[in-house]
Image (cartoon, rainbow, N blue to C red):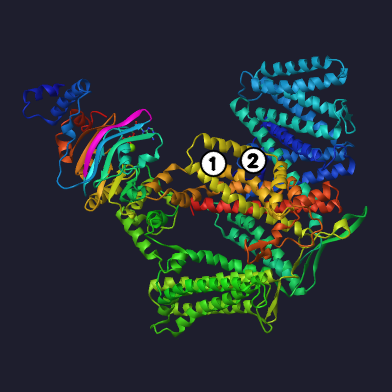
Amino acid sequence: MSNSINTEASTDTQTNSGQTIETDSLSTETTAGESDERIREAWRQYDFDGNAKLSVEDLNVWYGDDHALKDVSMEIPKKSVTALIGPSGCGKSTYLRCLNRMNDRIKAARIDGSVELEGTEIYDPNANLVELRKRIGMVFQSPNPFPKSIRENISYGPRKHGDINKGLLARLFGRDDTAKEGELVEHSLKQAALWDEVSDRLDDNALGLSGGQQQRLCIARCLAVDPEVILMDEPASALDPIATSKIEDLVEELSKEYTVVIVTHNMQQAARISDQTAVFLTGGELVEYDDTDKIFESPESQRVEDYITGKFG
Amino acid sequence: MSNAYATTDQLVSAESNIYDRGLDTAIALSVVGFMLGFVTLVNLVPPGASGSTLTTAFGTLLAVVVGAVGITSLASYANVVPVTSQRVRGVGLGLVVSTLALTAFATALPVTMATLLGIMLLAEALAITAAGVSSRLELVDAEPNMSAGLLSGGALGVIGLVMGAAVGGALTGFGSRLWLGGAAVAGVGLFLLTILPREDLGSTLPTAIVVGALGLTIVTGTIGVGWQWNPQTLSGGFTGGAVIPVFLLSGMLLSAWSAAKCRAGFGARGREYGAFLVINLNAFLMVAVMATIVVFVTVKGAGYAVHGLTVGALTALVLLTPALLVAVKFARTPAGTNDWNSGARQLFRVLPLAAVGALAAMFASVLVTGSPLRYVYDYTVQVNRQGKTLDTAVAVTPDTTIGTLLLTALAMVLAVAFFRSFGSLRKVGVQSERARLIRRAVPTVVLVFVMLSTLFLVLGPAPFGLPLGGTLGFAAVVGGAVAASGLVVYPLAGVLTSDEPTLADSAQREAPLFTLGVFGGLGLLLATLLLQPVAGINPQVGPVNLVPVIALGAAVASLALVALTTVAKRSSEETITRRVLAEERRLGLVGAAGFTALLGLHVAVTSTSFTVLGVSVANKGSISWPMVMEAYIPLGAEPGGIMPAIIGTVWLVIGATLFAVPLGVGAAVFLTEYAEQGRFTAVVETATNALWSTPSIVFGLFGAAFLIPRLGGDESLLTGMLVLGFMLLPLVLITSRESIKAVPDEYRDASAALGVTQWETIKSVVLPAAMPGVITGVILGVGRIAGETAPLILVLGSTLNAKAGVNVIDGFQFVSEPPFIVNDALMTASASLPTQVWAVIAAGVSGSPQMGWATAFILLMVVLTFYAVGIMARTYFRRKLNYE
Ligand SMILES: Nc1ncnc2c1ncn2[C@@H]1O[C@H](COP(=O)(O)OP(=O)(O)OP(=O)(O)O)[C@@H](O)[C@H]1O
Ligand SMILES: [Mg+2]
């Protein structure tokens, strides 16, 4: 308190502590006063060069009577990293699942709106879900490896798609892809920063891995199918800092070739790796969507600013 | 873990508290009493036993108890199974002391078993009272609650009601209603006595009264051995022989509970220990009852079942090999990180090894000395209402013919190598031009075969004077045999004639083709062997049987390649080459294993024998087991066997499983994965459950009235299979459905997100994960249907006169008109174990009762075998799903 008398005199050259005090008092006012801040259309408009990989328009999702996503429209640029941030329960996972129609699998979910993948409507009744999900891969919030060996987990997708043939028949017909499988397994695991830990026990059951290893295995499994878009739901939530930074490097690397949409609760992570950021706030609304630098340096919405600086959520 | 506590004198004087020691003895006494109750219940020792019978019985009991406690304390002393709990030690000591006392009592005094049991109850009552009172007088440390609680009060109240009614009725007669008064007084009295005083009195005094009263009735002879009560309302009656054991079981259960509560100082810990004892004694009773059933059947049937069992010493040795292997493995398994006393560990681990080894040595000595070993024992059978002593024996005879078993066992050991190497085999991915050539040739060959068969069909049934089946079979046999040898020899020639710089390289190049050769050859030879009896011919050139010759030749070729690659491996440096060569070497072994197995199969299927270098390989003579290998001889003139019934039951189970499992699992997949969960699935579920509880005779009637008219109009094996299949279906459906439901949705999501279709997901993720549950269902179901009698009586046709088992495999025949494959064996009536038991024992159809018991025993064994196979399969899948 005695400190504040000093700073009062020199408001121009505010010290750090002075700044904090000021924003603190400001924020309590705004969150109290502007909790029903109107979302302006312009905040969600994000202009970028090049083509959109995914364009979402007026997406609404209901779980029974629960309106979980409200009128979300968003264009996701090609070969870039898009971060989705927002408080828990605001509908990030729901939104992510809409992008490869995984919400179709939830009985209670009702989806309305349009999502286009390079101009093709994915909610078309004739859409080929197998092809769609091959092109848009997904890593889930909690690790879910199959109760099979590490190798089989990775080669599962390609095998089912007929890209890898194994077994006696394939061998008899001279189309055995064991070598190809080995390369694929190694490549995918290296990409997911797991190879060094498991290279000597590829035939062990994947359930014997630690939680963080399982999550990286799931990432590798997703990469093995070679999708165009990769949806990641908090892929690093169970990882230690080293593995996290490996995953972050991987995401940056991937963005050269792939379109990555990533949900994260880690602001620094979002700021580090993403090109653009979308902020969802409680109630399932997309509040602001813009360049990552813009969002983190000077967001338009007061609520977004509060959320990012940690005053609200 | 030190040795400090595990010394014998500490076992005796670990605690000097006389109260605790006394209660431990009381608990031990009730455990002994409980067991004695069971022993008298099953009439192992009748309640009326006295004199030498009694002393013998107690001597045995003493030996068992002292032996068990002794071994346990020895093991504890040696730190193998350390017993740390003071209570367990106390009870152990108490067991010895109380058994000793009982034995002394039984020897010294002229009492009957019943009196002794009554005295035991009285002693218990006294001990409990003393413990309760001393706790109430604060002579010992205890933390009793306010009251023993309503639950105990209620239970004792009910017991009081029953006892009051009995006593009242006995005094006044059940004619008047006075006994109701007795019941009420005793019930309410015990209830109040339990809940009103402090817990230490409340949970001891009423129990002591009940137990004491039970003891008194027995000791005073009110209810003695000869006692009988035949109420007019019941057609039967109660005898002392049945009532006294029940008194003892319930009285000892009660006193064990009370004593345990006292021992643990009442309160929460007392309840815990009391409940622990009661639950354990109950579990013991359950297990004992189940074991009794098995033991009963075994005792009644095993002797007759093994009469005349003769085993060649070599065969016995072979049979013993797996046990020996397991024992060796067990002995070599490291004990883990515990600092177990290594000497004792060695002792305990080597014991089984020593036992098996001793048996092996015995059989070997029979082989060397050439004199048979017989275990003869008398067994009386009823022949024409006269007891006749049967020369029943288990014999081990020396023999020079090695049985098929020898071959098969050898092949099995090698087959383990096969499964091991198959995994790494897949790693070999080298292409080969010749492999492609052969691959292209395969469709042509198939086409030619099809065309030839069509030609035969068109030209008529017997073009070469052979029936069609025979012709095709002959063609297949010769073609298969030639192709098999070609496939194996060709790559070998390739290796030898190759112009590659090193042998290793050429061997590696031939690897895929060789794989093709071995597996193709194996497949073809198998087909050949199976077709041979169908074709009704033995392809012979002069005195030489082609198939074994080819098999031997191929095995030699395999081994030659093994040798070659081993040599090559030595001169090769490259690691990849090494790997490939190692795999091929193993493959060679596998090939040899396969051929040996086929050879064994050949001998088994074709009933032939052949001689190599003076060693005769035959399928008869090395083991003979009349009960299992001979047909039934009616009228019990000679003890024959029940081979047709065994074969019938095995086929029934196989047929029913083949029918029900795919259908049930399929329906479960549909209902769980595809159908909308709603009213429809609910209805199906209810219907399935209802079907599962439908009485089996209803299934039998359905089979008789619906299936039989549509399937040949006569009782048949096929109808039996279908009816049992229908019975199995609901259980398979229910359990599969539950286990499919239990597969986490995450797996399905993960698979869907990879763009895998639902069906592929079900096939490769859901069903494997659900497999253990599905197998559990099949195990339970098979257990039920294998022993099912009622429906089989209606649909299978009981053929006690069957001279041979149904020959289902040989029964398949190809015909030139639809349905092209027929099987007469499936359409004929068959014997089965349950119907045979029913016919022999219950219906009194010819034969001695011993025959029936022996049949029941073998039925039990067959069911247990199916059960074991199921459990092993389940364990395998469980392991696969978790950590391999
Ligand atoms: N399967 C479902 N059935 C019903 N309601 C659901 C379902 N899945 C999500 N919801 C609801 O939808 C809302 C959004 O959930 P969602 O999982 O998308 O949140 P989220 O932003 O991913 O949160 P978190 O950061 O905690 O993962 C929540 O209120 C949640 O309760
Ligand atoms: Mg989420």
Mark 2 chain: B
Residue A20, quarter of picture: top left
State the mark number for residue B3. none
Q: Residues within 10 Å of mark 2 (few under 14, many from 20)?
A: some
Disc 2 vs disc 1: which is toward the camera?
2
Mark 1 chain: B
On whether residue B211 falls in the magenta region, the answer is no
State the mark number for residue B738. 1
On whether residue A67 falls in the magenta region, the answer is yes
Q: Which quadrant of the render holds ligand 2?
A: top left
Is the CB of mark 2 within 8 Å of ligand 1? no
Tell me what residue is drawn at x 65 percent, y 18 percent: B198
Q: Is residue B174 above or below residue B76?
A: above
Residue A170, quarter of picture: bottom left
Residue B13: horizontal and vertical position, in percent?
66, 38
Q: Is residue B229 above or below residue B164?
A: below
Q: Classify residue A173 as left or right of residue B415.
A: left
Q: Is residue B707 above or below residue B46?
A: below
Marks 2 and 1, Cα distance to the nearest angstrom?
15 Å
Secondary structure type for disc 2: helix
Specify the segment rendered in magenta: A64-76
Query: Given the image, on which type of amino acid does mark 1 rest?
Result: Glu
Asked if badge 2 and badge 1 are on a common chain, one would say yes
Q: Which is nearer the N-term, disc 2 or disc 1?
A: 2
Tell me what residue is drawn at x 60 percent, y 66 percent: B412
Residue B608: horizontal and vertical position, in percent?
71, 74
State the mark number for residue B692. 2
Residue A291: horizontal and vertical position, in percent?
16, 40
Tell me what residue is drawn at x 46 percent, y 42 percent: B744
